[in-house]
Amino acid sequence: MSRRPLLSSASIALTEAVEVLDERGRRSTISIPAERPLTVYVDKRELVTLMTLGAAPEMLTLGYLRNQRLVRSIDDIASIQVDWQVGAVAVTTREGIDNIEARTAKRVVTTGCGQGSVFGELMDEVDDIALPEAARLTQSTLYRVVDAIRTHPSIYKQAGSVHGCGLFSAEGELLTFIEDVGRHNAVDSIAGRMWLDGIAGGDKVFYTTGRLTSEMVIKGAQMGIPFLLSRSGTTQMGHTVAQRVGMTLLARCTGKHFLLLSGKERFVFEPEWFDALPGLAAR
């Protein structure tokens, strides 16, 4: 049985009210997303500073460590404690991280907004990832996912300037939704939640409002998720990595419109649903 780490429950305001003047010189107050540094210390060693909204700092830290392959098992982590007064999170492992200096030395700078680098060895492990071939995503489920994101309360609707990621069941039920200033932070936070709660990815669907870059595809594959959807587009490298790992990639998912880019054998077209959902605007 896994030993869950001791986690803080650090809360902080996600938006800030600021006074603005419009084009006519009229004064008003709007909400803008918070953005704050969170420096990660592992066994008292400074590792990285993440720029984050702060919605789920413990899950963000856990997911970051997992997606960077610095910690292999949830059992290796004794505690994660966030202190917003100093903008830091202290991670304590049970037996330390072997050769951490060398493992964090090689980096690949990615196109992710905010802090968006992955340790170079991740690219070398792509070929070891096997996604379930038998998983299927129907067109009607895709539309349920898109509509659930459209109607879900969010910081973006209140203040804009953030990315959101959602984890869905195979039936299109929203399981977890996280927003952050960078899409990589949001996906790391969901990865942390999945890891902590032992949630398997093979029968899940992942949605992001951001671009499908190579980093996003690699992280989705590491989570074992065969379906990656985006409201935005993809990059050439994101597409290449998706084909390499056998991921089903769908971009420009808005209303009834979508573009199926890879993993076409897993997708089940249902043409009758295109006209059956009048609430979704065709774009």
Image (tube, helix red, strand yellow):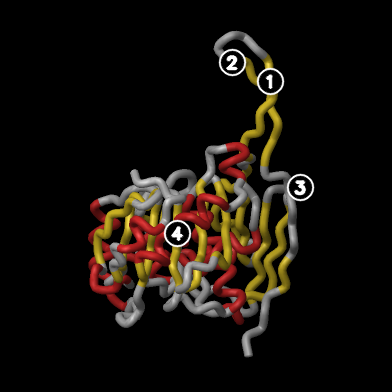
Residue at mark 4 to residue at mark 3: CA–CA distance: 33 Å
For the point 69% across and 35% down, the residue is 16
Q: Is residue 121 left or right of residue 32?
A: left
Mark 1 or mark 3: which comes first in sequence? 1
The residue singled out by tag 1 in the image is 28
Q: Mark 3 is on which residue type? A: Gln
Q: Is residue 52 left or right of residue 67?
A: right
Tell me the kind of residue under disc 2.
Asp
Q: Furthest-bottom residue in view?
A: 1
Instruction: Identify the element where label 1 is drawn.
Output: strand
Secondary element under disc 2, as helix, strand or loop, is loop
Q: Residues within 10 Å of mark 4 (few under 14, many from 20)?
A: many
Q: What residue type is labelled 1?
A: Ser
Q: Residue at x 32, y 82 (%)?
A: 134
Residue that numbered label 4 is attached to: 207
Residue picked out by circle 2:
22
Q: In which quarter of the image is the C terminus?
A: top left
**Quarter placement of the N terminus:** bottom right
* Residue 83 showing in the rendered view: yes
For marks 4 and 3 on the same chain, the one whose residue lies earlier in the sequence? 3
Rounded to the nearest angstrom, the CA distance separating label 1 from label 2 is 8 Å
Q: Is residue 38 left or right of residue 200?
A: right
Disc 4/disc 1 C-alpha distance (Å)? 34 Å
On the image, numbered disc 3 is attached to which residue?
85
Image marks 1 and 2: residues in contact by CB distance under 8 Å: yes
Q: Which of marks 1 and 3 is in front?
A: 1
